Image: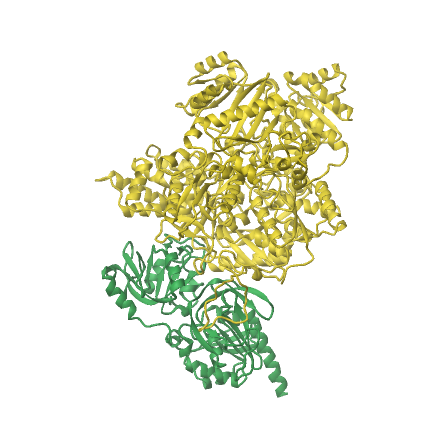
Amino acid sequence: MTTVSDSEAQQAVLVLEDGRSFRGQAYGAVGETVGEAVFSTGMTGYQETLTDPSYHRQVVVMTAPHIGNTGVNSVDMESQRIWVAGYVVRDPAIRPSNWRSQGDLGQALRDAGVVGISGVDTRALTRHLRDRGAMRVGIFSGPSAQRSTEELLAVVRSAPQMAGSALAAEVSTSEPYVVSPPEGTPVRFRVAALDLGIKGMTPALMAARGIEVHVLPATTSYDEVAALQPDGVFFSNGPGDPATADHEVDLLRSVLDDGVPFFGICFGNQLLGRALGLGTYKLPFGHRGINQPVLDRATGKVEVTSHNHGFAIAWPEGVPTDQPADTPYGPVRCSHVALNDDVVEGLHCETVPAFSVQYHPEAAAGPHDAEYLFDRFVELLSTHQERSASAQA
Amino acid sequence: MPRREDIKSVLVIGSGPIVIGQAAEFDYSGTQACRVLREEGVRVVLVNSNPATIMTDPGVADATYVEPITPEIVEAIIAKERPDAVLATLGGQTALNTAIALHEAGVLERYGCPLIGADVKAIQLGEDRQLFKGVVERCGAEVARSAICHTMDEVLAAAQDLGYPVVVRPSFTMGGLGSGFAHDEESLRRIAGAGLQDSPTTEVLLEESIMGWKEYELEVMRDRADNVVVVCSIENLDPMGVHTGDSITVAPAMTLTDREYQRLRDIGIAVIREVGVDTGGCNIQFAVNPADGRVIVIEMNPRVSRSSALASKATGFPIAKIAAKMALGYTLDEVPNDITSSGGTRPQQTPRSASGEEPSERFYSAAFEPTLDYVVVKVPRFAFEKFPAADPTLTTTMKSVGEAMALGRNFTESLQKALRSIERKNSSFHWREDEAPSLGMARALLEQARTPTDGRLVLVQQALRGGCTVEEVHETTGIDPWFLDQIQLINEIAEDIRTQSASGSGELSPELLRHAKRHGFSDAQIAELTGLDESVVRGVRHALGVRPVYKTVDTCAGEFVALTPYHYSSYDEETEVAPRERPAVIILGSGPNRIGQGIEFDYSCVHASLTLREHGFDTVMVNCNPETVSTDYDTSSRLYFEPLTLEDVLEVVHAERQAGPLAGVIVQLGGQTPLGLAAALKAEGVPIVGTSPEAIHLAEDRGAFGRVLAETGLTAPRHGTAFSVEEALEVAHEIGYPVLVRPSFVLGGRGMEIVYDDESLAAYVGRATEASPEHPVLVDRFLDTAVEIDVDALYDGVDLYLGGIMEHIEEAGIHSGDSACVLPPFTLGRSELAEVRDATRRLAEAIGVRGLINVQFALSQDVLYVLEANPRASRTVPFVAKATGVPLASAAARVMLGSTIASLREEGVLPSAIDGGAMPDDAPFSVKEAILPFRRFRTQTGEAVDSILGPEMRSTGEVMGIDGSFGAAFAKSQLRAGSSLPTSGTVFVSVANRDKRSMIFPLKRLVDLGFRLLATEGTADVLRRNGIPAEVVRKHSAGRGPDGTERTVVDRITAGEVDMVINTPSGRDARADGYAIRAATTSLDKPIITTVQQLSVAVLGIEAMRSGPLEVASLQEHAANLDLFGRDESGALSA
């Protein structure tokens, strides 16, 4: 769909499915792309955002005006590639300046064939998405920008919707791999991590705590998981509509049935919700940014967290969030709630060893306030290990 | 957590007078704090000696003590008011140091009023450098390698260890006072010597140099549940080595990856926790090595600071307000974010779900981190022209007197807006054809830019323009290449404009014009590049429809709906200005603080806004000064954070005209800046309310004003105009010496001098005309020994309301802003006051004033001379308002919008029968004293700059002393931490011959009070002949004698043996001596008296202090006793 060429000074146009359009200049690759338009409000961490698989099939609008200032480097990659379907910025950096920089972002986007647009009133676009909700969008640059608006709109409207999309398989690793604790850190636990679009920082933070992380393809069966004899199972973040992920939900139910400790992040949180019998729904425009306040109901403390989710768990009607809800796996508490809009941001099962959060304790990009959740997972693994050990004894 | 119920009353300590390093930002933060506390039902007791503040308005606190901020006085206030707690984290270093002193004296414990916000331990951990080093290390971070020293020997040994250059930082001083870089032993001895003296604990820190590293700041807040948020990151464009207050700074940080930023954030949070700031804000500064990212923590302030005011304005997150709520016990999640919240509480028990309705009320809490979709640039404003002898090199000691902030959708737009907001010639980038630098010249400019000075960025821009590469410039200045690249981009656009306008049709394409505007070019800059008139550029631009839109500061980058119309302009697509129905009044603020135009003008603007909002108008504030109350987002109905140039103001006017009806623009309240725009605005068809631009011209133009005086039969000192030295001498001979000379093109005392003879006159004119050959020099007869009188009055076309008559303590010749004055006048008789009233009325009528007028008179040998009339709010309006208990600025705003004085008297806004010009006999005395920044500045050789007062204004701020007795009022005006009139001890006297006669009586009185006098030989002779004993000391110029053991007066002053110095400037021979004496005294912060009048009054003050402890009373108590509102025409209190 895209052609790579020098995008210098080429015209570009962004067309939303409701007909509003913005003109600008080509950024990154020249060509055309469609996806779901979402905005991200982080002021740092564009490289982490671009390489986060959860952004697969999404056209990301950056609200921070200057993008690319610090270039790109090999360390800040959250996966092997850039995942966004398109990129919208206001003022791309003329040149990167940072001691860690190894390359230019515009070039990296061109190399990855990612079509972008710059010079857009990104605030106007963001306010539009905020008021009308996330919607499909197309970016057309170079020759394709010359086509009529009607034609471009037709292209945008023919693109698939995000609701109802199963995308995990598209972003997941094709082969299992292992992330081992760094040298000098003894292996304490083995965890099977289902890759639904996992970010590199997640296994890294687990490994730093003595976990040998077996990252598995999304299509992995429960037997294959069980064959690893894991101390715990982890479900990662990832793109798409949780309502479509029936295979993963079945797998998770087996994990819960067997009483294996479980931790889920983001998509993994939504899947825990589904496994417990809760519903999910699409937020009007989602949470994407690194300044989102979340209240930990257990401690009453607020953590500033990194978010990237368009879907959320629907708490059962009629049950207050400070009361547990009944599920086939026993009571579940809403452990965390978004302060801005009361969205359920975490689940804690009272009888089975499982918990999850909707946001990103691995940060990357974002604040480290929620990193303690990895410690909590380690505690859960450790308690469970002790318990099984004493049961055996 | 709910708020603490044990706190029913709080003492808030303010920051006192505006000084360099501690300015209007504390009025902003303190006002916010007081308002919050009162909203919460807490009784607020305030102490602040600064009358020019909104904070000290009687409505802001329950009991407002305009009293000196010294431990003794504050203790007296505590004893009287018995507050439950003391809040000292919103009044800068002054408040914090006072709180520490009160703690150490056991006062807080004795009266059971603990500190809230940060406790003593936290303050000490944050401020004590050695303790702070431990804090940082416990947080797993690094500080610069360093050593604490208490003596010069320790200093020298430590420097050997660390290697030169080393940084010297005295402990417990504000704004980096006394800090500096020492490159060798000689400079080390000088800087560390002064530092040991400046530090109240005789302690300096020496540390490794991290000059040239990148500098960052974080604003962090913590509540008592240990929630912590980072409100803002700030990156300094000027690398380490320049005080952050003197640096150009940018928010958010521009050149950090997320990993690096999160590392700073982690450290910042760990530090605020380790220091133990219970609740409130703190500011933490970092240096980052650009080569490898090594992070060093420089310092933290456990209180609201200048940077937090900047961060509040930059993000819309009101740090001080929220800090005050947190001090009462609220947690961040319980406090709403005003910008986005419409009501309700969070979290709720039912989460929003797929079927959930959008609630009608939205509560967004303050427990979040603002995210910006714009760029903020702050540029400092300096006043080196006022201190020609001062070294203009920027160092770790702050020297700027104000700042401007600008917002834009990219860095280039914000930077160019900020540079033009500074309102100084040559502060903006330029591309003048005749000055296009060659590569050689560019390299020379770059060499100049190696040393940081005011205006360095223009040098950088010119160097890049002349062909220096970004790498070369980065190498030389340490400025990050990213910023330099942006400046290069600006240069390239300028070149495109020039090329396009010089080619073919000579017309600019709409695309290029839009492109240039997007990168912050002003119409004036485009005019310069195209050779067109600015108005032509504007006309073309408007014809092409190239106009700015206005975006909103909303804390959340558009994620949520913003409810507060806090706008900034940008050349983007979509505007966010909402339509409105009520008529709007646009109030033009006063721009960056500078000497002569400061917080006093902001005071009047804020009053106008608050009053007019209550009387049927929507008020629209335009200003670019982040330190002020006027730029608080809830002071006015709408806020436009914009430069105060004609172009920027016209665009705001246009936008507001599109939005709804416009009543007019107020130019009278913000000082000279808006006044200077009046005529041009009117020419563009903008309605000006109040005094018309034509009337303003009558007062400002010398010729026109001469005719006004002739019409009204009033007298001005004789004067003439000269274009050459010969002409000047001729005028001087005709009108007689001494004469006051000044260039014709500047106002506000700039470049003025008093000369006594031909030689100095010729020298002055030589200098002045060389500077600007096309402008003449004005020569006025100088009224020696005249009494100067300042009047603020209100005129509506029929009635005059005399706000107050102030008598200067110094004689004419000292700039009115630097002169102490007293209200009511202490030596003027009834007939003289009547004459002043009559002259003021005649002037107001003849000029056509509608609103405020300030007149300066001089009374000499029974003749009342008019020195100048300003048809605008003056510097003294807030002082007069507080001294008389009448809201003068509010009344002025009403008059400008058509109310009459008669109706305001009826309404009770003004007293019904009398006014401030007829103060009753039992009225308290209010003394206003100027605060001078001499200690801040050093000459290039490291000496203090001269502290002589003159016709050029040099004070940065003022204090007010109010008391029933004049002597006590004066003593209070002289009393501040570390400096006050002595009540016993040794006084050194050296006065000019002309002053010898008049000093005898006051000196005799000093001796009777038990003071010991030291005098130079000539003065001592005169004293002895009058029966006053005085010890003769060696003159400084006489040296230390043949064997170098005989100590001079300067040695004795430096040794701390002298408690007060009386030194009036005399002939040229003694000038060098006088300078050395004053410099030594200034360095030690001992009182120095440079006029005879000051001496007489000082003696009264000393007597008052010796007669017992000074008594404290609140403004509310004074106002109740004075009660102008309850008095009849005779001044008697009506029954």
Percent from the top left, x then y, of residue A262? 52, 78
In the rendered image, the vertical position of residue B653 relative to residue A241, given as above or below: above
Q: Residue at x 63, y 25 (%)?
A: B1090
Q: Colour of chain B?
A: yellow
In the rendered image, the vertical position of residue B1127 relative to residue B779, given as above or below: below
In the rendered image, the vertical position of residue B262 relative to residue B935, given as above or below: below
In the rendered image, the vertical position of residue A359 relative to residue B623, given as above or below: below
- Say which quarter of the image contains residue B1062: top right
Extreme-left residue of the structure: B504
Percent from the top left, x then y, of residue B941? 57, 31
Q: Decide if residue B181 is in sight here.
A: no
Q: Colour of chain A?
A: green
Please tell me which residue lies in front, A35 or A168: A35
Q: Is residue B515 left or right of residue B613?
A: left
Q: Is residue B511 left or right of residue B161?
A: left
- Say which quarter of the image contains residue B490: top left
| Count of numbered marks | 0
Extreme-front residue of the structure: B1135
Extreme-bottom residue of the structure: A392
Please tell me which residue lies in front, B388 or B441: B388
The quadrant of the picture occupied by the C terminus of chain B is top right
The colour style of the image is: by chain
Please tell me which residue lies in front, B890 or A211: B890
Q: Decide if residue B712 is in sight here.
A: yes
The quadrant of the picture occupied by the N terminus of chain B is bottom right
Please tell me which residue lies in front, A188 or B116: B116
Percent from the top left, x then y, of residue B684? 35, 37
Percent from the top left, x then y, of residue B1028? 76, 19
